[in-house]
């Protein structure tokens, strides 16, 4: 497991009383830090089925009156997966979907334990004609196993930075007043990963995105407030 801790920014704020009276009110120093861990994928569920969900070639061919694309049957997909020793189960997920390119055929959910296995599957099935394939689900490391390490790193870094800045300002660092976590809608699920997840589940994902590392960012941001004396 590779952990990448990244200091994103440090924000220094010198706060005084509302009257801004330096001589009478205690001053404070705020340090804002952010750490990022890259969570690795542990398991992929890849969905394969007979019939093309977005058959652009078939559409163009039909306009020319030559819609003669070959098609791989569900039985052939099943035999192929068994022959290549992939672990899978069958589902009828598309049983209620209306799509002229799909019949009420089983959907094969292939369980893969690494990116290497995912690539092996993709390279194996991309030659099959008239099928659909996409990543249905990705299971990641549990971020809670890294929380202690993140918080220790943030705290020690904040103390070191606060001592440095206080010394430059000719002050000494007093006691810590508060610690507050900054939360946002995409802190644990950044927009980039949201877009990637949506794209990975599309039928065209395998054609373009096979070099993706599929890592997901786990971000924690804390504000440390110290007393300056």
Image (cartoon, rainbow, N blue to C red):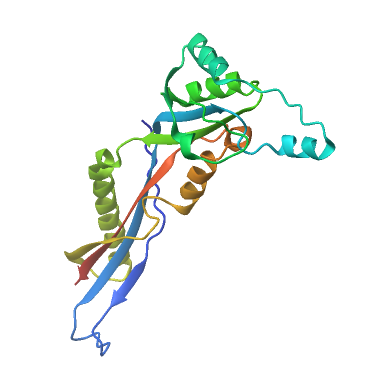
| Residue appearing at x 18%, y 86% in the figure | 24
- Above or below for 208 versus 75: below
When asked about the image quadrant of residue 39, the answer is: top left
Q: Is residue 155 left or right of residue 110?
A: left
Residue at 51% of width from left, 11% of height from top? 84
Say whether residue 196 is left or right of residue 25. right
Question: In the image shown, does 136 or 67 lie closer to the viewer?
Answer: 67
- Find residue 151 and report its horizontal and vertical position in percent: 25, 49
Viewer-closest of 228 and 218: 218
Q: Residue furthest right?
A: 64
**Residue in the picture at 62% in, 37% down:** 100
In the image as oriented, which residue stretches furthest toward the left?
Answer: 175
79 left or right, relative to 180: right
Quadrant into which the N terminus falls: top left
Numbered disc total:
0
Q: Residue at x 31, y 58 (%)?
A: 161
- Return the x and y of residue 126 as percentages of the image width and height: 62, 24
Q: Which corner quadrant of the image does residue 18 belong to?
A: bottom left
Residue placed most toward the observer, 190 or 164: 190
């Amino acid at each position: 497991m590779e952990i990448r801790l990244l200091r994103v920014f440090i924000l220094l704020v010198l706060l005084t009383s509302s009257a801004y009276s330096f001589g009478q009110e205690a001053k404070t120093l705020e340090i804002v830090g952010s750490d990022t861990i890259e969570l690795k994928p542990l398991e992929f569920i890849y969905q394969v089925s007979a019939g093309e969900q977005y058959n652009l070639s078939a559409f163009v061919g039909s306009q020319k009156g030559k819609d003669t694309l070959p098609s791989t049957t569900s039985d052939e997909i099943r035999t192929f997966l068994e022959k290549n020793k992939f672990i899978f189960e069958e589902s009828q997920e598309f049983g209620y979907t209306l799509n002229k390119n799909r019949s009420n055929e089983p959907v094969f959910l292939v369980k893969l334990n690494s990116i290497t296995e995912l690539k092996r599957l993709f390279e194996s099935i991309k030659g099959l004609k008239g099928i659909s394939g996409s990543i249905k689900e990705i299971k990641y490391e549990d971020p809670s196993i890294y929380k202690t390490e993140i918080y220790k790193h943030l705290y020690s870094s904040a103390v070191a930075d606060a001592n440095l800045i206080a010394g430059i300002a000719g002050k000494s660092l007093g006691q810590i007043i508060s610690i507050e976590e900054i939360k946002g809608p995409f802190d644990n699920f950044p927009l980039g990963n949201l877009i990637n997840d949506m794209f990975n589940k599309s039928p065209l994902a395998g054609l373009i995105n096979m070099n993706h590392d599929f890592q997901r960012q786990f971000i924690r941001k804390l504000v440390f407030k110290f007393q300056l004396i």
